[in-house]
Amino acid sequence: MIKIAHSPDADDIFMYYAIKFGWVDCSLGFESVALDIETLNRATLEEVYDVSAISFALYPFVRESYALLRTAVSFGNGYGPKLIKRKGAKLKPNFKVALSGKYTTNALLFSIAYPQARVVYKNFLEIESSVLNGEVDAGVLIHESILDFSEELEVEREIWEIWRELSNEVAKESFSDEVGEILGKDECLPLPLGGMALRRSIPLNRAIEIESTLTKAVQVATDNKPLLSSMLLNRNLIRVNATQLDTYLNLYANAESISLSKKQILALDVLFALGERHSKYDKAIKASEFFIPREYAQLRNC
């Protein structure tokens, strides 16, 4: 039995439930659990699950024990988490802010952009209320929370804007050849948010099969979005309404979630280099060096 963990937000549920509903042939025997992303990040540090959704910012910390999967990925492209505050409020350099977890990508980027801020960590569902009741001065909303929040609040800054500024600098200085080859003129790298990691102790042939199954599930889910969305809504498996679900899936569970592209891989490399530059990681790593070697399956069949 393979223990697979994902978050309870709409895009993860959407991508996984093609397996749950039996739309993808699966002889592996998956046992699933849904937990918030920071809980999954910390569980991955402790090697609790065979396969788990993680924040991409966590990966350098678990690279020795987990491989990085190419599928079920979420990136922002002109959008993403939002730093919100009460309308009209002025934030001091040392403002108090609620983040969804130490190892989230938004926390990494936030800490670089706002080094003097006083950070507290909360479940992402509690962040909006924490700002409204004055417990904190601001908070970073993630998941479906970015779609619908109180009219008493306003966006101070998009995490996407922070990413664009920080990544452009690193990309130009350290990845100029790759940028020239992969990106079009005035094109920005997508914001890496979350993906999946697989325990390295799993035999390689099984690891390849797991990644293949998950890739098929994301493909089938994407190809059948209207039907799958309806089934999830009818079973009350989603926290949002139909309109919000459609919007959210268009953002985070789409054709670009099926398998990492060259552009997305470059974005990961830039994220890891950015973290190393600001002393968040011990070294800058290249994502492609930590994928499962799928060519092994082809060699075994020769």
Image (cartoon, helix red, strand yellow):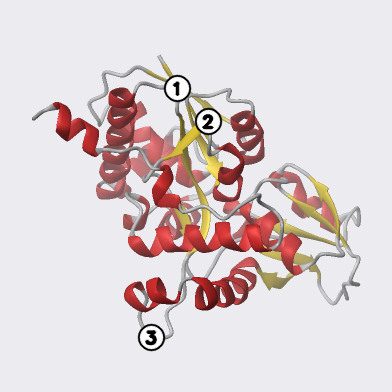
Is disc 2 surrounded by few (<14), some (14 to 19) or many (20+) residues within 10 Å? some
Q: At label 1, which amino acid type do we have?
A: Ser
Left or right relative to 93: residue 247: left
State the image coordinates of residue 271 (x, y, percent, origin top left): 56, 60
Q: Are marks 2 and 1 in contact (CB under 8 Å)?
A: yes
Q: In this rendering, is residue 34 above or below 13?
A: above
Would you name the residue on which mark 1 appears?
Answer: 201
Would you name the residue on which mark 3 appears?
Answer: 185
| C-alpha separation, residue under disc 1 versus residue under disc 3 | 42 Å
Instruction: Kindly report which numbered mark, 2 or 3, lies closer to the viewer in this rendering.
Output: 2
Q: In this rendering, is residue 168 above or below 56?
A: below
Q: At label 3, which amino acid type do we have?
A: Lys
Would you name the residue on which mark 2 appears?
Answer: 65
Query: Would you identify the image quadrant in which residue 21 lies?
Result: top left
Residue 66 visible here: yes
**Looking at the rendered structure, which numbered label has been put on residue 102?**
none
Question: Quick one: SS at disc 2?
Answer: loop
State the image coordinates of residue 152 (x, y, percent, origin top left): 79, 67
Residue 150 visible here: no
Instruction: Kindly report which numbered mark, 1 or 3, lies closer to the viewer in this rendering.
Output: 1
Question: Quick one: SS at disc 1?
Answer: loop
Labels 1 and 3: the sequence-earlier one: 3
Quadrant in the picture for the C terminus:
top left
